[in-house]
Amino acid sequence: EVQLVESGGGLIQPGGSLRLSCAASGFTFSTYWMTWVRQVPGKGLEWVSRINTDGTTTTYADSVKGRFTISRDNAKNTLYLQMNSLRAEDTAVYYCTRALFYYDSGGSHYWGQGSLVTVSS
Amino acid sequence: DIQMTQSPSSLSASVGDRVTITCRASQSISTFLDWFQQKPGKAPRLLIYGASSLQSGVPSRFSGSGSGTDFTLTISSLQPEDFATYFCQQTYSLPPYTFGQGTKLEI
């Protein structure tokens, strides 16, 4: 069974940094592209970032480019999102996602339970 | 960026009703369109991928259709557990892979 478990969220002051982790299990992590999606509570969904299988190709939404860094450790079956220079508008639940198929670089078909990040003074 | 326009934004219906939700893309996305269901406090759940393929374990009352710019999600006979918010997402070509704004389905 595919499992994605996020951790690392919490309350952080504007301008601060936070690193989210996503522990993956139930599949061969190193063969799938991975994606982060976020959702302001009670609002819509926003695609944030994706990373290829070996971590050499990364893509970001304009809203986080230059501030967030996606990475992965295939030996630890873990996906990361390093978030710097956090702003109030980054407040959201952050989801780790995976596509159904290994060849799909864009799908968000399996979702973790989410990790809430609150940026506030 | 490709814009996804979902309609309606909210919908009231009754158990047993047939319901259709639409999603329109600002440019052709072939069939790179997924549908999700989300209940309060939960992560989205995949219903339909590739515009019309039913995800394993999803009841057959859910169906998807469309290609190019216009897509529909149909629930043939609403059940009490179907009252939720529904989102579409396009995954055509390069990111960002944008979502529709959601349709809240209420009793």
Image (cartoon, coloured by chain):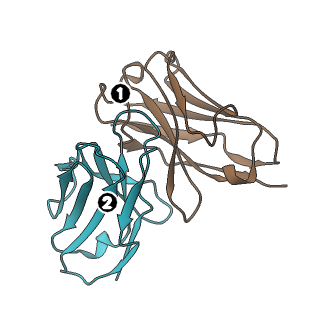
Look at mark 2 in the image and give the residue it sits on: B23
Tell me the tag on residue B42: none
- Identified at 63% across, 43% down, the residue is A63
Horizontally, residue B86 falls left or right of residue A14, namely: left
- The quadrant of the image that shows the N terminus of chain A is top left
Q: Secondary structure at mark 2?
A: strand
Residues at marks 2 and 1 on the same chain: no
Look at mark 1 in the image and give the residue it sits on: A27
Horizontally, residue B39 falls left or right of residue B59, namely: right
Where residue B7 appears, as percent x and y from the top left, is 35, 69
Which chain is cyan in the picture? B
Q: Secondary structure at mark 1?
A: loop
Which chain does tag 2 point to? B
Residue B17 occupies quadrant: bottom left
Where residue A99 appears, as percent x and y from the top left, is 35, 35
Q: Is residue A14 above or below residue A68?
A: below
